[in-house]
Amino acid sequence: MPRKSRTSGRRARRSSRGGGAGREESQILSVMNAIHNRLQSQCTVIQTKMSALAEAMKVLGSAPRSAGASAARRPSRRSRPSRRPSASRGARPVRGPRGSGNSLKDFIRNVVSSSSKPMRLMDITDGVVKAGYETSSKNLSNQVSMALAKMSKKRIVRKVDRGVYAL
């Protein structure tokens, strides 16, 4: 008896699978169309009710607010103002151009060079403020620490120990 080839059986199975998938897709599409039609009819009913409500409010002397008007009353997270202070809100005055001796790094260099011993971060921060550095920052020590790290990489100051710097 002649033997059937395996490939012919596989082809038959594949073609039958394809037909089943088409039926499933058409069922899914019909369900999705039914949901779409139901939502569309609900939308029509809601729009009818909203227009009737707007007419009633107009008769009473009040115009309905749009959806955008309620959002304008309370600021959302996206419309939050930037964190940078503007000149009109009493921000610190703009310092001179680079190299004029008014940058934080220049103040740090002056404070560290005035001491004969290595200084701690808090001592440097206090010295910068006493030297007249104007800032509105609540965490000036973080800014001084970052500036010292950059200055030590450029070998402007020398890091002696953790949080201790010298010139």
Image: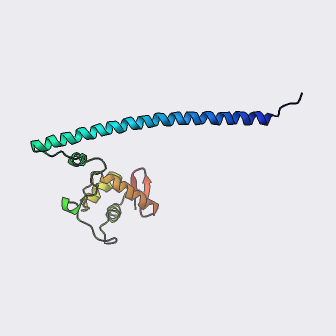
Please tell me whether residue 148 is drawn above or below residue 18 in the rendered image.
Answer: below
Please tell me whether residue 147 is drawn above or below residue 38 in the rendered image.
Answer: below
x and y percent of residue 80 in the render?
A: 27, 51
| Of 85 and 23, the residue lying toward us | 23
Please tell me whether residue 139 is drawn above or below residue 57 in the rendered image.
Answer: below
Displayed quadrant of residue 42: top left
Count the marks. Answer: 0
Q: Is residue 133 left or right of residue 30?
A: left
Q: Is residue 10 left or right of residue 120?
A: right
Please tell me whether residue 123 is drawn above or below residue 3 in the rendered image.
Answer: below
In the rendered image, which quarter contains the N terminus? top right
The furthest residue to the top: 1
Q: Is residue 44 left or right of residue 66?
A: right
Displayed quadrant of residue 98: bottom left
Q: Is residue 7 left or right of residue 140?
A: right
Displayed quadrant of residue 70: top left
